[in-house]
Image: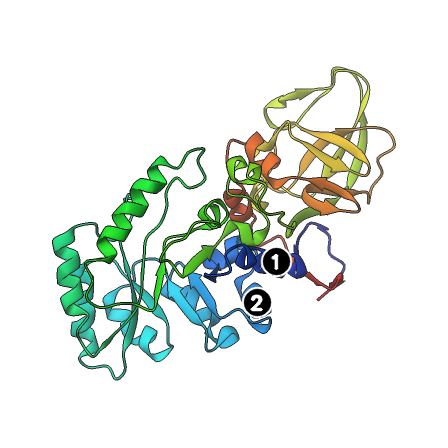
């Protein structure tokens, strides 16, 4: 059957791998962890993880144990770290599938040890230190010493220790320095030494690429997918990321409007003169939020403003009489030599690229390209 909605999210796997290689080259003394949580920010974790694995990547991270389990049949012997808190009653699945879990507290570790009494094998853990993010993990020195004692158990493989910068994409380093100092002080409390130490995210991977420290891993999230964590990081001009993601569609209807005619829900737009309106089959059910109204997208070779309120399944743009049914539409990314920054698209809506990617609904097909050919 012919696809009635020619809307696609195009993912360039070559650009993805290029970004991974560029970022790890920038930090050549650190192992890169490919962040594939939330279905690789909505882009399709199985395809992305499989492609990276086949090209030598062996370290990944997800948000949940369920996400990690869904990927183990495509990334096999890789380290897969679950960044969120896992129910201790599920540790057997982590042990059986060689998945590393985040130790968020002494109580969590104690509960896991109780479960492990009846499980054959060791549980790999990365102890999370809260250095100022305030999300999960502990900063209490006494609790850390108690966790260190529990690490003596022969049921635990102390694989890593980590933290997370909360302001590395900012314009100064003050809070980063504060968190770094906290992290280094707490690392010293451990008598057991882990294989991996990491605090870096996309922003700090670029920002502190020249810094000498004791960390040997760095986590590659939004930068892997071709976006800078912030304008501050982009301005450092340390790395040129390739565009990975493009949201495209086609015009399905064109109609001439007379001056004064209204359109859309709430009749929020009125034709200022005789003009043409084109309809594109994508709406807020697909992830184009209503606040995108007013943003200019590429239709054919024209910059066309989204007019009227974005509908659930469609939206409308003001265009010239030259626009025809079937003309290409670009919301962000690259297509036919044209480009719109996803950051510009996000900024217009007072959000960030992360949210734009994650909001694209599964109804929009993900189409993957390798060597300029669709898979």
Q: Which mark is residue 276?
A: none
Q: In the image, residue 199 lies at what x, y percent?
A: 37, 53
Query: Label 1, label 2: how many angstroms apart (C-alpha)?
Result: 8 Å
Q: In the image, residue 42 lies at what x, y percent?
A: 53, 54
Point 79% across, 45% down: residue: 337
| Residue, disc 2 | 52
330 vs 171, left or right, is right
- In the figure, 171 relative to 146: above or below? above
92 vs 360, left or right, is left
| Residue, disc 1 | 16
Q: In the image, residue 221 lies at what x, y percent?
A: 49, 53
Point 53% across, 62% down: residue: 45
337 vs 219, left or right, is right
The residue lying toward the viewer, choosing from 224 and 330, is 224
Colour basis: rainbow
Q: Are marks 1 and 2 in contact (CB under 8 Å)?
A: yes
Quadrant of residue 344 within the rendered picture = top right
The residue lying toward the viewer, choosing from 375 and 243, is 243
Point 53% across, 59% down: residue: 24
Point 80% across, 31% down: residue: 255
Q: Secondary structure at mark 1?
A: helix
Q: Secondary structure at mark 2?
A: helix
The residue lying toward the viewer, choosing from 43 and 164, is 164
Quadrant of residue 104 within the rendered picture = bottom left
Q: Quadrant of the C terminus?
A: bottom right
- For this orientation, the residue located farthest to the right is 322
Q: In the image, residue 332 lies at what x, y percent?
A: 66, 42
């Amino acid at each position: 059957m012919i696809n009635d909605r020619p809307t696609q999210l195009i993912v360039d796997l070559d650009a993805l791998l290029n970004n991974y290689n560029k970022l790890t080259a920038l930090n050549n003394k650190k192992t890169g962890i490919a962040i594939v949580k939330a279905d690789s920010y909505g882009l399709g974790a199985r395809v992305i993880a499989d492609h990276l694995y086949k090209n030598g990547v062996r370290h990944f991270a997800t948000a949940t144990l369920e996400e990690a389990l869904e990927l183990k049949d495509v990334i096999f012997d890789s380290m897969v770290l679950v960044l969120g808190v896992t129910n201790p009653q599920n540790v057997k699945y982590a042990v059986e599938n060689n998945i590393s879990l985040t130790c968020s507290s002494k109580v969590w570790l104690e509960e896991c040890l109780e479960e492990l009494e009846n499980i054959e094998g060791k549980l790999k853990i990365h102890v999370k230190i809260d250095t100022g993010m305030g999300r999960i993990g502990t900063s209490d020195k006494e609790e850390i010493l108690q966790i260190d004692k529990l690490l003596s158990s022969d049921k635990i493989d102390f694989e890593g220790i980590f933290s997370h910068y909360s302001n590395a994409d900012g314009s100064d380093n003050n809070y980063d320095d504060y968190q770094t100092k906290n992290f280094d002080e707490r690392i010293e409390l451990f008598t057991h030494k882990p294989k991996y130490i990491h605090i870096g995210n996309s922003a700090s991977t670029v920002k502190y690429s020249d810094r000498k420290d004791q960390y040997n891993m760095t986590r590659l999230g939004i930068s892997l997918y071709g976006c800078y964590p912030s304008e501050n990081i982009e301005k450092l001009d340390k790395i040129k990321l390739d565009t990975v993601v493009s949201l495209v569609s086609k015009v399905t209807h064109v109609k001439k409007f007379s001056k004064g005619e209204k359109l859309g829900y709430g009749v929020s737009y009125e034709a200022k003169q005789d003009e043409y309106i084109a309809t594109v089959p994508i709406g807020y059910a697909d992830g184009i939020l209503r606040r995108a109204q007013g943003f200019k997208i590429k239709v054919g070779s024209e910059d066309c403003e989204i007019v009227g309120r974005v509908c659930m399944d469609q939206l409308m743009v003001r265009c010239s009489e030259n626009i025809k049914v079937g003309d290409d539409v670009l919301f962000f990314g690259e297509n036919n030599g044209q480009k719109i920054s996803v950051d510009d698209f996000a900024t217009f809506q007072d959000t960030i690229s992360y949210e734009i990617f994650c909001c694209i609904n599964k109804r929009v097909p993900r189409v993957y390209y390798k060597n300029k050919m669709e898979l």
